[in-house]
Image: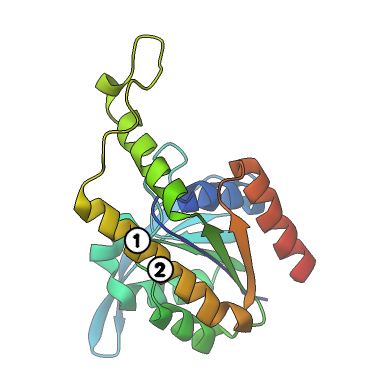
Amino acid sequence: MKVIIHITGAFASGKTTQNKAIMKIFSGGSELKLIKGTDRVGKNDVNYCYTSGGNIASIGMLDYNKSTCGIDPVMGFLTAEGVYHSVERAFKDHDFVIVEGSQCTGAWVRNFSKMFGTEHYFMFHLNLSYEDNFRRLKLRQFTKNKEAFSEEGIIESIYVPLSDKNYNNVIQKIRQYNTLFEKYGEGLKALQVDATLSAEKVTKKIVSFINNNL
């Protein structure tokens, strides 16, 4: 049995947090190991990159101590072809593979479905409203800026506006992932989760859904 756990959602929706949590649970606390390299596929060199932990792998880089993980940090190295090849390669030694990144498209879903089937293809959409997404991005922006905090650790001004570019990107990503879930979710084992819930509650819903549908 080969199980894909595909996590989608807009910026700051908690995708990486869930990637790490699921990895910890299904790996049984195994030590993480980065597997990265290049294979000759036909006439082309195709890169691969995934993080292994016991019987589960996460495509891309995963580090419990880093905030940005998954496919995004290595997308320039992988490209879409490398993402497909990484999943294929990871399944040789693992029964569970996590796919998480902000650059997912419908083509990814179609190709994964064609390559591995849909019987054990799980899609989890972390849903946020525009307002909640903007709020989280502002909070993330300020947590990265130590000058935004008083000595007591209280945010002085959470209402500094995001740039027009950021607003447009957020709106575009929310629409993209909503459409992705609506279009492809029915053919998969799919669940939309309220991303405003605590990270622990979101993880519990995801893990419960997987265990109840395997």
Q: Which residue is at a point 43% across and 49% down the rendered structure image?
A: 131
Q: Which residue is at a point 27% across and 72% down the rendered structure image?
A: 79
Q: Which residue position is annotated with label 2? A: 175
On the image, the x and y values in percent for residue 38 come to 29, 70
On the image, the x and y values in percent for residue 70 come to 41, 56
The quarter of the picture where residue 174 lies is bottom left
Q: Nearer the viewer, residue 168 or 206?
A: 168
Q: Nearer the viewer, residue 83 or 209?
A: 209
In this view, the residue farthest toward the top is: 151
Q: How is the image coloured?
A: rainbow
Residue 116 shown left or right of residue 16 in the figure: right
Q: Residues within 10 Å of mark 1 (few under 14, many from 20)?
A: some
Q: CA distance from mark 2 to mark 1?
A: 6 Å
Q: If the image is split into quadrants, where does the C terminus sit? A: bottom right
Q: Which amino acid is tagged 1?
A: Ile
Element type at mark 2 = helix
Q: Are marks 2 and 1 in contact (CB under 8 Å)?
A: yes
Q: Which amino acid is tagged 2?
A: Arg
Report the disc number at residue 171. 1
User: Where 62 sits versus 3, above or below?
Assistant: above
Q: If the image is split into quadrants, where does the N terminus sit? A: bottom right
Q: Which residue is at a point 42% across and 58% down the rendered structure image?
A: 10
